[in-house]
Image (cartoon, rainbow, N blue to C red):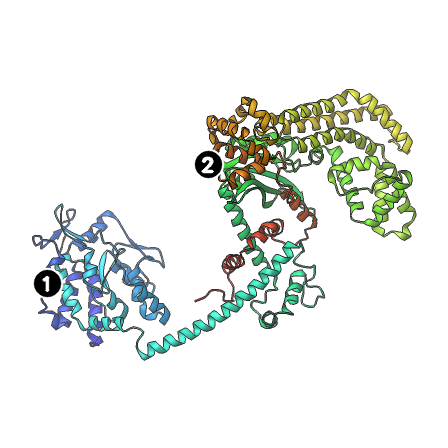
Amino acid sequence: MSDPEPCRIKQEEAEEQIDVMVKVESEVLSEDEEKHHVSEEKAPIKTEQSFLMNSTAVNDFACTQCGKSFSHECDLNLHMKIHAGEKSYPCVACGRSFTHVSSLRIHTKRIHRFNASPTVADVISQLKNFSDLDFQSKHEVIKDGRPMPELKDLLQTTGQKITRSFQRDWYDRKDWLCGCATRNRLFCYPCLLFSACDNVWTDTGFCDLKNLPRSLTKHECSATHIQSQIALKTFGTSQIDLALNEQHKLNISIHNAMVKENREVLKDLINATCFLAKQQLALRSSNDSASSSNRGNYVELLHAFAEKDERLARHLQTSTLFSGSSNGIQNDLIEAMSHVIRSDIKKDIDRASFVAVQVDETTDATNKAQISVILRYVAKSEAACEVREAFLEFDDVSGDRSASAVAQYVLGVLERYKCVDKLVAQTYDGASVMPSELNDLQAKIKEKVPHAMFTHCYAHKLNVVLQDSAKSMSECRAFFKTIEGLGTFFNKCTKRTQLLDDVVKRRLPRAAPTRWSSKSRLLQTTSMYQSDLLTVFSIMIENPDIWDNDTVIMASGYERWLSKASTCFLIMAYDGIFNETDALFRVLQNKAMDIGFCCARIRDTIGAVEDQRQEFKSFYERFEQKCSSLGLTDSVQSQQLVRDERKRLFSNILDNITAQLRARFDHFSGLSFLGLVDCTRFKEMSKHFDDAKVQSLSKYAKFFDFVRLKADLIGLYSSQTVRNECKSPIQLLSFLTQKNLTQAVPEATKLLQLALTIPATPVSVERSSSALKRLQSYSHNRTSQGQLTSLAIFYIETERLQKIKEDKEDFYAKVTEIFIQKERSMDFIYK
């Protein structure tokens, strides 16, 4: 190596010259090179002439604005940035910007006392830190190779004419040459890595194209350059390097062994969590401390696994950072697996042609009201097609259930899943939005997506929807809450239900056991067994020794409630209405493809409900007779005043019911196109094509070619094979998919997908419970375990989780990849 002292003096002189006058930078450095590298003086330069374009020598570069002269074109370009006010080099410490990179370097050394990189993207500054790296990092830098960017702005001009410019083949001809696009200069790659001396090729970079051949030859003949080349070519072969390399390999081997064990343990944690989800069992208990006899299903299951697995047992006993039983680990696992489920749902939705959104209010065991979003779509595969309903997320709506708030939330969810333009239908239960704003809600969605028609959902029990909407009236809210509580009172205790059954059988020996699990039949059950319920409650009150305190107290409350004439009035009023709507619901469930028949039944039901208004007199007489037979009494108010008040309430109830029916079914006739894919009528339709049903598709005109659609349908109607093998729309779509006929009848295929996506029919969902049923089951059994949406999707979409898990290694890899993104002390990433 050459004497380092001259190099140090040269660096100080160069910095001093830069501080005084930037324009002489290249000249000073050139003189220094001649001074300290004697052998460079007589180096031949003829062989390097091909590096440059033929041009006339230019001795001076003058600024047209101030007249200042420069020896090099690049220095003139830097000077012109001063006139333009351009400062391309910001200080990463204080944010101040500089025109010259040298000025920035001096600033950082003098003000901040450290060598800051001129810019974040300055690769040269990164390479100059090579000596500070560990062995593996150095090896990676050398493996990546020298930076060879295109330096388009490195050129020399005479007037408006470019006389010299950067040529990319310079990199090929000099294997040590590299460049920096940020500084727009050339550098020496080996010297940047291994030289302790600063010169123009390692500090500021070379830009003097006129003198490039001479400088190239001078530099590559220098001792420091030759030594740097040797150091680069022999890196990793010295005894020290080899020792470092062997130690590094050993460290990697130990690290990877630990990673493998951690990942195997993580698989056990994943398996335990998936098992509990499959069995619909809670992960935690109310007391999951180490001293508890029951630390929760998750922890207990891990220890059960450990009895047969020495590796897991050893890990659970010895690991302090990653035991796997902490709540944080459980939460991260649930979040990771929920992310995998969401990704699978997104893939389904991306492939689907249409989606429908279903919004419901669900109250959990903690009495917290949430709004939930479910998407329905047709999932495509090579083997078949199936209708899927996917739960997406929960949100707390207790603060604002206005149409604007719910619409904004729903559209936000759809945008996150990138399916707004695919939305073809929207449906809501009676509680997800204030009943008076149901029309406004669907209108706001249609402002964004005009073809998203509002329809009643097959999964929404019509009587339950009407009950929820009735809660907007103060007189009815407490009534239906009490009815629901009465169902819970009997449903959760077999001893109570057994007593009721015994009382009923004494009066009706052949009566079937009472059922309190159906929310849609609660009111009818209460009406049917009102006298028996009063008897049951009296028995409980009169025999407190054989009943617990809660039962006796609640029985007293229900007995007083059922003894009120006002309660009997509401029971009879809604019982008469729900008898009509129950019949309509059965038609909608069984005849949904016959839209004409359904519309006629809807009109009949609305008419029958409105006719009850004219029959109030006879209704009230029946009410008074029942009150007399049950011994129910009124308040001390005037009988006429009470009658008038009840007549007003009766009228309000009928208004609420008819308004909800009209809001839900006014546009039901727009679904008449469903009859086009009613497979049971294909033979009939082959003889007479119904063009009116095609016209009902006008709202979806952007998706269809109606001329081709008619041709496709006529072809399917005429096929004896299709008529024999396909008895439902889902069977027909699967038939077309399996036989590779979807491209033969593309418009008919789209119509089938549309018909199956709209949630007016339960077709094909019967094989597994609907998403709403799974959601209600989860909410009913949920305890406070936090992580509302992630935990919910993990449990509600457990069937999807099991399918994803069929490819075990891929599933483990995906979950692990997400899990390890959390900041944690344990190692999970292989080196």
Q: Earlier in the sequence, mark 2 or mark 1?
A: 1
Find out whether the residues at labels 2 and 1 contact each other: C-beta distance under 8 Å: no
Establish if 217 lies above or below 440.
Answer: below
Left/right of residue 824 with respect to residue 632 in the rendered view: left
Q: Secondary structure at mark 1?
A: helix
Identify residue type, mark 1. Thr
**Residue 571 percent location from the top left of the image:** 80, 33
Percent x, y of residue 277: 63, 55
Determine if residue 264 is in view: yes
Residue at the extreme left of the image, as rendered: 56
Residue 346: percent from left, percent from top: 51, 46
**Mark 2 or mark 1, which is nearer to you?**
2
Residue 207 against residue 42 in the figure, above or below: above
* Residue 779 x/y as whole percent: 67, 47
Q: Nearer the viewer, residue 113 or 575?
A: 575
Q: Is residue 553 visible?
A: no
Instruction: Tell me: 243 left or right of 641.
Output: left
Q: Which three-letter amino acid code belongs to the residue tagged 2?
A: Gln
What residue is drawn where x is 16% and y is 64%?
216
Outermost residue to the top: 614
Q: Which residue is under mark 1?
A: 47
The quadrant in which residue 278 appears is: bottom right
Q: Which residue is mark 2?
A: 743
**Dividing the image into 4 quarters, which one contains the N terminus?**
bottom left
Q: Is residue 586 left or right of residue 681?
A: right
Instruction: Please identify the quadrant where the C terminus is shown.
Output: bottom left
Q: Quadrant of residue 204?
A: bottom left
Instruction: Name the disc covering residue 665, or none.
Output: none
Position above or below: 161 against 354: below
